[in-house]
Each structure stands twice: as structure tokens, then as C-alpha cells.
Amino acid sequence: MSKKKIVVAVTGASGSIYAKVLFDKLKVLQNQISEIGIVMSDNAKDVWYHELGNKDYSNYNFRFYDKRDFMAPFASGSAGFDTMVVCPCSMGTLGRIASGVSDDLITRSADVILKERRKLILLVRETPYSLIHINNMKTVTEAGGIICPATPSFYSLPKTAEDIAATVINRVIDLVGFDYESYQWGKNH
């Protein structure tokens, strides 16, 4: 299995626990990753602090890029990043991606991933969806992106908030293509 070059963007949507659980799993999977870049919006940092009560995102040994850094390698298709995960993905970010508005590093990177026909996974976090949201998800899907709603499952009988978030993040890990053992319906019960 070839190693992944992955971009993770964290937006200001509620659901920082999803980003935290994803970061934790990526640490475990580092032997399957050749390069990882993280972009967090200012709102993402504020929401993380509000929801999780800390700034522990800065403790992860990943390379973080400023959302205005258009010199980041994944701002160009020539850098060969094969996957981008936006976790959580706000409806504003979804709308800008669907419209092709590349006004920051998050939306520029998503645009690059789509134009290069690589894997874009948007962990959308909103409820309920408006017709605008649904149409934007349709547009991104038609462009080759994958919409992965932050909708947990309960088959595995999760006990903690992190366990609940992991039911979604394990799906993201599967979608990226990592070799990782997680709960599978029909196999684990």
C-alpha cells in the first residue's frame, strides 16, 4: 500500500470532537502517511476551545498552515496530495467549495483536489439542511467529492462522546483508504 499525502481542514462548524478524534487516529496511522498538512480556520480554533475547553490541537505533531498561506504545497496539484478531508465542514465552506470560490487555503485546496480528480471528503455538520445546503452537496458530489454527514451510528454501543464521534471518523478513515480495524456491521456482533 502506498503512503497517503493528506490535507485536513477544520472549519468553524460545531463538532470539534470529530477533528480531535480524526487527529488522534491519524497519529496512530502515521506509518501509512507520507505527508500531512492541517489548516484550521480562526473560527475552528475558537469553536475547539469553546467545545473542548482546550487548545490541544497545537499539541499534535502535524504541520499546520495558515488559511492565507497559498504557498502551502497542497495549494497546487503538482504537490500530489491525494486526499483532503474537511472535518467538520461548515455550510459556508461547503457553499464556497461548490461555487468554486477559492478565497482561502481551505477552499483553494478543495478546488485543487477536485480539479485533479482526487479524493475530497466533506464531513458536513449542520441540521436540518436547507435546500441550498442540499444543492451544494449535490454539486460537490457531481464534481467528484464525497459528502459524509457527521451522523453517528450506535451499532457498536459507544460509551463516550469520543466513541460516538469515532463511529463517524472510522467511516472517514475507511473512505480515505487506510488499513484500519474498526467496527463492521455483521462482523462484530
Image (tube, helix red, strand yellow):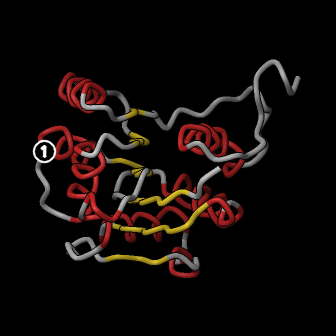
Q: Is residue 66 left or right of residue 1?
A: left
Residue 98, percent across and down? Answer: 19, 38
Q: Residue at x 66, y 58 (%)?
A: 25
Q: How many marks overall?
A: 1
Please rate how many residues cluster around mark 1, counting C-alpha atoms within 10 Å: few if below 14, some from 14 to 19, many from 20: some
- Quarter-wise, where is residue 91 in the image? top left
Label 1 sits on residue? 100
19 or 61: nearer the viewer: 61
67 or 74: nearer the viewer: 74
- Quarter-wise, where is residue 78 in the image? bottom left
Residue 14, percent across and down? Answer: 42, 51
Q: Residue at x 39, y 58 (%)?
A: 81
Q: Is residue 32 left or right of residue 118?
A: right
Q: Is residue 101 left or right of residue 113?
A: left
Residue 178, percent across and down? Answer: 63, 47
82 or 66: nearer the viewer: 82
Residue 27 to residue 55: above or below: above
